[in-house]
Image (cartoon, rainbow, N blue to C red):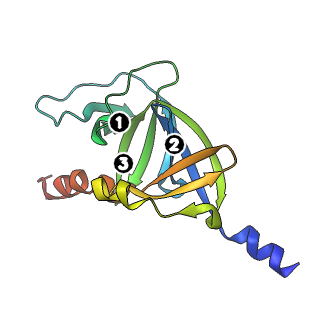
Amino acid sequence: MREERKAVEATEHLATFFLASEEYGVDVRVVQEIIRVSEITQVPRAPDFIKGVINLRGRIIPVIDLKRKLGLGEVELSRQSRIVVVKIKERLLGLLVDGASQVLKVPVSSIEAAPDEVTEVDSTAVRGVAKMPGRLIILMDLARTLSLELREAEEAPE
């Protein structure tokens, strides 16, 4: 009985989403909500991966095209497109993704470090890969992936 309980406890809760045909996962605790894509207002002279800003119940939050940020092309807006609203370092950010998947528990034992060839290119984005039956989920470290944006925002005068 005790061993069974230990196995149950050793899990990570992930919110998963799609960029192209790949499934990505982030710690569910940073995800505030997942919303349909609404009107995104473009911001002049913003970096190319900043799609613009949205008004989320009175709060203006920047929307980052996560595909473009990761060098994977650009999110083609469709009915499946979503904005994953995350809170990192007390800041709300919207991540534009091709589609939201689900929230799931992943056994820690199924998570492996990303292959060296992958992390050599950009070790900041990927913290591992979860092997699930019939699928792989790329685990992202959002705080490190978005560290430049977060740092810039902290330095900007209010």
In whole angstroms, how far apart are the C-alphas of marks 2 and 3? 11 Å
- How many other residues sit within 10 Å of disc 3, few (<14), some (14-19) or many (≥20)? some
- Nearest to viewer (mark 3 / mark 1): 1
Q: Residue at x 55, y 48 (%)?
A: 137
Position in image of residue 20 (x %, y %): 45, 31
Taking the spot 32% from the left edge, 25% from the top edge, the residue there is 40
Residue 44 placement (x, y as % from top left): 13, 28
Q: Quadrant of the N terminus?
A: bottom right
Q: Percent x, y for residue 122?
A: 29, 54
Which residue is at the front of the view, 12 or 151? 12
Element at label 1: helix
Which one is earlier in the sequence, the residue at label 3 or at label 1?
1
In this figure, which residue is indicated by the disc labeled 2?
33
Residue found at x 36% / y 56%: 117
Can you name the residue that lies furthest to the bottom here? 2
Kindly indicate the quadrant of the structure image that contains residue 119: bottom left
Q: Mark 2 vs mark 1: which is more N-terminal?
A: 2
Query: Distance from label 3 to label 1 (Cα)?
Result: 18 Å
Q: Are marks 2 and 1 in contact (CB under 8 Å)?
A: no
In the rendering, which numbered label is found on residue 92? 3
Q: Secondary structure at mark 2?
A: strand
Furthest-top residue in this view: 78
Q: Disc 2 or disc 1, which is closer to the eye?
A: 1
Residue extending farthest to the right is: 1
Q: Looking at the image, which is closer to me, 154 or 23?
A: 23
* Residue 69 placement, left or right of 88: left
What residue do we see at 26% from left, 31% from top?
A: 52
Say which mark, if any, is on residue 67.
1
Please name the amino acid that badge 1 sits on: Lys
Task: Give the amino acid type for the residue marked by disc 2 in the picture.
Answer: Glu
Question: Can see residue 90?
Answer: no
